[in-house]
Amino acid sequence: KIYLACAFVASAVMCFLHVLRQNGEVSSSWDNLEVFACLVHISEVFVAWISASSKSSDAAVYLAVGRLPVDVAMACSVLTRRFIGRQESTVSFSYAASFRLVMLFNLACETQSEEFLMRRRVHLHVVSSVAVFFAFVFCVSSTIELVEIADGITEEAVLSGSTPATEGWTVGTTAYFVIIAMVTVGYGDLVPRTTLGQALVPILTISGIAFVLHVALGVAHAWEIGASGGGEYQKRGNARHVLVVGSPNRQALRDFLEELYHEEHARESEDLDCVVMLLPEKRPLMKSMQHYLSRSRLLRSRVFLIEGSALQVSDLERVRVEEAVMAF
């Protein structure tokens, strides 16, 4: 956990300082902090290399191909700028640490207990997918900005009037440009000026569309897990809840819910949720109940279907059995 925490903080610091540098907010203190974070990052790469080499040659090759080129470019750009006296330079690949943040997040999730992963897997799917998307946007934005700035287009040049304002590239404007390009809107208010930038944009845009689909599929998969009962009961405010377990048939379950939320009991059931935990072999019943609940606005917001067994402690924790006012 200490290893993951140190690596995560180092990567986050590098991303944060990259944004500050691109906005012109640099100082010797920031430079020293960036170098320290870079050294921590290099140490983390070295530890990862030793760990991969001890496992298998395939793992070491995967690390060398997948990580080392980016890490070497990132470390060289930071250390070279610091030690050759070009602290004012904005050229840096430290933004690549954003993808390392995503990798560390997924690694941290893998170290959690099986019960935790089962209870939180819907949320973890969504967070991981969205994190990959934002890391991609950040990296693409910084790459385009780096290419354009390298040709002399800077924010100071824009403000001084030496270049059209529509060609000014900052972290925020470039991220805006990338998102607009990925969703294929293309307002035309920002246009790459360099030849390399013009060549990169179509490639990065197509890759971005693939990432948008990846995020959408990740969120859809998370929704599918939740819809199939794979999540956990999230208590709403001060609501109470009753728990139904076992192997009821469809008609018995419908009769129970209709009686529980009958208009004659509206006052008593106003803050009452019903959590139904069905065995995995009851998936046809779960699908049937999902269709039934979708037709009632009241039931859709009060009844929660969870897949699990009353004999499993982790499943009982997912439905908050100790907080239930009654169990059937």
Image (spheres, rainbow, N blue to C red):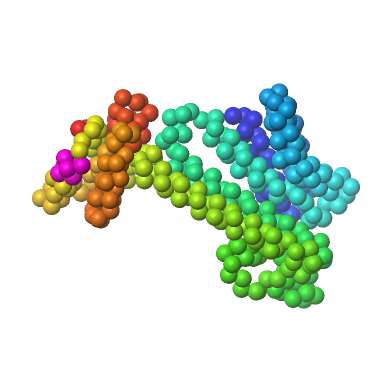
Q: State the extent of the magenta-drawn residues as a range.
A: 250-256
Q: Is residue 196 left or right of residue 259?
A: right
What x and y, as percent, mark residue 91? 80, 54
Residue at 39% in and 40% down: 231
Q: Where is 106 relative to 293, above or below?
A: above
Q: Is residue 109 left or right of residue 69?
A: left
Q: Residue 62's image quarter?
A: top right
Residue at 51% in and 46% down: 127
Is 36 in front, or is 183? 183
Residue at 59% in and 35% down: 107
What x and y, as percent, mark residue 170? 70, 63
Q: Is residue 254 magenta?
A: yes
**Most prominent secondary structure in the magenta stretch?**
helix
Q: Is residue 326 left or right of residue 119?
A: left
Q: Residue 202's image quarter?
A: bottom right
Residue lying at the far right of the rendered structure:
84
What x and y, as percent, mark residue 81? 84, 49
Q: Is residue 195 magenta?
A: no
Is 179 in front, or is 183? 183
